[in-house]
Amino acid sequence: MLESIEIENTIDTDQIKAGSKPLAYKLNDIQPKLCIQHISKTFLSKNGGVSALEDINLEVKEGEFVCIVGPSGCGKTTLLNIVAGLEKADSGEIWISGRKINGAGSDRVVIFQEAALFPWLNVIKNVEFGLKQKGINGSQRRNTAMEYLKLVHLTKFQHAHVHELSGGMKQRVAIARALAINPEMLLMDEPFSALDAQTRWILHFELQSIWLKTKKTILFVTHNIREAVCLADRIVILSTSPGRIKKEFSVDLPRPRDDNDVNVAEYSTRIMKELKAEINKVLKCEMDADSCVECDIKCTTEEAAKTDAGGGI
Amino acid sequence: MYSVIKRVIFFIFLIGIWELLFRVGIWPEYVLPSTVSVGKTLVNGFHDHTFLIGIAISMKRIAIGYGISIVVGIFLGLLIGRIKIFEETLGSLISGLQTLPTICWLPLALLWFGLNDRAIIFLVIMGAVLSITIATDTGVKSVPVLYLRAAKTMGASGWKLYLGVIIPAALPHIVTGMKQGWSFAWRSLMAGELLIVCLGLGHLLMIGRELNDMSQVIAVMIVIVIIGILVDRLFFIKVEKRIRERWGLVKA
């Protein structure tokens, strides 16, 4: 089975030449949906240290599902926020469909780790929120919202209040709310990491089916390699301090994929193995200096399962 | 249910002691009236509409004053909570004025407006507005960043962001401020009505004093307390509880 999996190191810095404008891609006929150019940013990481993203270059094609994977503190969320326009980069540019972005906009909706649903609105009104901002009238708004609520199988709960929903249901409403305004792309920031394994497993299926139906371009941030393999067309690995694109993998497994599928597990293990050095680097940062823990990953599915349970890298 | 019974027994006991003290006759009736005469005054007061008119007039004043306080308070709170320059300037003024007892505004109100309704309404506003402003400011500052980010990525901005996200997200704090503001407003109203003679419940109290009618004084006091309790318990505490549940601040 491994032979059919194509792991390649496709990162090629010459691909994106310094100063070249995405318009140039029109010549190649395929304009990328998202073009991240030379993004650098220094920021304070959660544990108080100073981290940095260094010269990030990435292109995402129309309809592509790309996962950004990296250890905590590597700046993957910061990168997503920069794409969303919620944070400013120190240097570099973000282009969406050939337009340079400047600030947040409804063409790139973010789905956060916590659903960020508004508790003063019920489910259907939450889904309608973005449409209301666009000034779409009442009945049309309701119809569109119902359509997307149907997509996430939650029409039964349209009048429920947010506090009555489970974590998984909240995230499904958040997905419906984001899709309802028909954005050019979805930006997902570890949306399933706060959920239990069972719910996450279901939502992996659901997200895949939504993606197959809507063909939305998705940029998905996670620290969980297994999740990335389960969802993505392409996986971009970020290294830590400094945050750089270390490697890219394309995943060519049939869909829908299952977290527990042998191929997914095997694939995760192979990526994990490639990332051994990176994992050790993080471990060394997080543990006491006198400990000499070495993360030794064997290329077996059981090992992968164990490591995965620990939250990936 | 058990606590209600305890409460009822306590009040019956209290009224019993009061009646007993009256019967012993240590104090004359203009110092300590009988429970029966206070009860009669209450019934008569409602029967001949004196109390109803008093309540209506007081309620109208507080409705106007408190209504203005809510609008102005929320507006000022938003300014202070969201805009740095207002926080540094207006914010310090507001927290300074908060230390001033409302009744200290009376001389100023009399000179500005004279002995009339407007002076009383001004007192009510000064009583309530600062609490609502400060609570709104706190509420706005504690709006989860996540809500703002989610709203922004869905295209909300400007006044839509304020009306659709910031104010509702701050509502639990705003309602708490409104509750506190209400009790300040109610006190200021009574103080104003006691000192400025122009009907209302406070004025009925003063009439009782002028006529040496202790029954009326106590009866009106009871009415004032009951209205205060009704608004606080039946309205604010319920609203506050429901909002806190819906907003996920307490487990339902």
Image (tube, coloured by chain):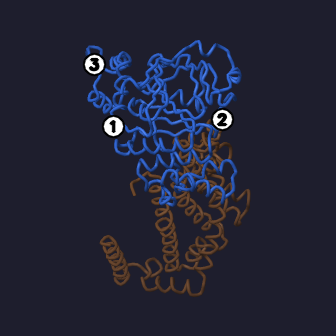
Chain colours: A blue, B brown
Q: Which is nearer the eye, A154 or B140? A: A154
Image location of residue B123, percent across then percent down:
64, 59
Q: Which amino acid does label 1 sit on?
A: Asn
The residue tagged with tag 1: helix, strand or loop?
loop
Residue B159 or residue A61, whichever sits in front:
A61
- Nearest to the eye among marks 3 and 2: give it: 3
Picture quarter with the N terminus of chain A: top left
Please name the residue that numbered disc 3 is placed on: A296
Q: Residue B85 carries which label?
A: 2
Please report whichever mark, 3 or 1, sits nearer to the chain's N-terminal start.
1
Q: Name the residue under label 1.
A: A260
The label shown at residue A155 is none
Can see residue B91? no
Q: Quadrant of residue A196?
A: top left
Q: Mark 3 — on which chain does it sit?
A: A
- Which one is closest to the eye, mark 1 or mark 2? 1
Measured in 3D between alpha carbons, the distance from the residue under mark 3 to the one under mark 2, in whole angstroms, is: 56 Å
Q: Residues within 10 Å of mark 2 (few under 14, many from 20)?
A: few
Of the residues shown, which amino acid type is indicated by label 3?
Asp
Identify the residue shown where x is 51% and y is 82%.
B42
Give the side of residue A203 with respect to residue B176, left or right.
left
Q: Dots 3 and 2: beta carbons under 8 Å? A: no
Secondary structure under badge 3?
A: loop
Tag in front: 3 or 1: 1
Q: Do the residues labelled 3 and 1 touch (CB within 8 Å)?
A: no
Q: How many marks?
A: 3
Q: Mark 2 lies on which chain?
A: B
